[in-house]
Image (tube, grey):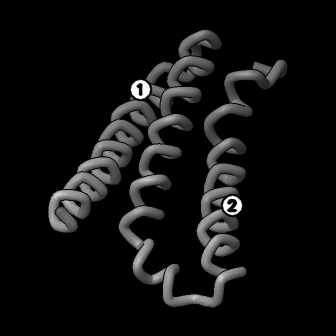
């Protein structure tokens, strides 16, 4: 059972990474169309969130060895930091009024 869960965690992580690369490529390719920027930026953001969830599940045994407070704080902080950085590059250009 544990081996199947581990495989599913890796599939989730890899699926998020592949979707992110694909949608980010489309995001950069269609940078003139504002609607495309919004759509591909949002899809890239969602796929990155999927990859972060997969990464968090893969690293769960490491987090569980930490003290109780840090076991929940560190994965959350890493995920939030990655999403904040990604939002600067993915969502903001689609809603930027200057373009």
Relative depth, front residue between 83 and 63: 63
Could you tell me how far apart the alpha carbons at marks 2 and 1 are, in whole angstroms?
Answer: 24 Å
* Residue in the image at 41% along x and 26% along y: 26
In the image, is residue 41 above or below residue 67? above
* Residue in the image at 64% along x and 13% along y: 34
Spot occupied by residue 42 in the image (x, y as percentages of width and height): 58, 27
**Left or right of 39, for residue 96:** right
- Disc 2 or 1, which lies upstream in sequence? 1
Spot occupied by residue 15 in the image (x, y as percentages of width and height): 29, 43
- Label for residue 45? none
Specify the quadrant of the image occupied by residue 90: top right
Relative depth, front residue between 40 and 60: 60
Q: Quadrant of the C terminus?
A: top right
Q: Residues within 10 Å of mark 2 (few under 14, many from 20)?
A: few
**Left or right of 93, for residue 75:** left
* Residue in the image at 34% along x and 34% along y: 22
Spot occupied by residue 13 in the image (x, y as percentages of width and height): 34, 53
**Left or right of 34, for residue 53:** left
Relative depth, front residue between 38 and 77: 77
Q: Residues within 10 Å of mark 1 (few under 14, many from 20)?
A: some
Q: Quadrant of the N terminus?
A: bottom left
* Residue in the image at 55% along x and 18% along y: 39
In the image, is residue 33 above or below residue 54? above
- Label for residue 26? 1
Farthest residue toward the right? Answer: 97
Q: Nearer the viewer, mark 2 or mark 1?
A: 2
Spot occupied by residue 59 in the image (x, y as percentages of width and height): 42, 73
**Left or right of 50, for residue 22:** left
Specify the quadrant of the image occupied by residue 79: bottom right
In the image, is residue 20 above or below residue 83? above
SS of the residue at dot 2?
A: helix
Location of mark 2 (residue)? 81
């Amino acid at each position: 059972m544990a081996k199947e869960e581990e495989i599913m965690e890796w599939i989730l992580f890899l699926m998020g990474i592949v979707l992110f690369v694909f949608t980010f490529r489309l995001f950069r390719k269609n940078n003139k169309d504002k609607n495309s920027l919004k759509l591909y930026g949002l899809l890239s953001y969602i796929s990155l969130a999927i990859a972060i969830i997969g990464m968090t599940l893969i690293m769960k045994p490491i987090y569980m060895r930490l003290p109780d407070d840090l076991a929940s704080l560190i994965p959350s902080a890493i995920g939030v930091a990655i999403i904040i950085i990604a939002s600067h590059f993915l969502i903001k250009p689609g809603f930027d009024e200057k373009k």
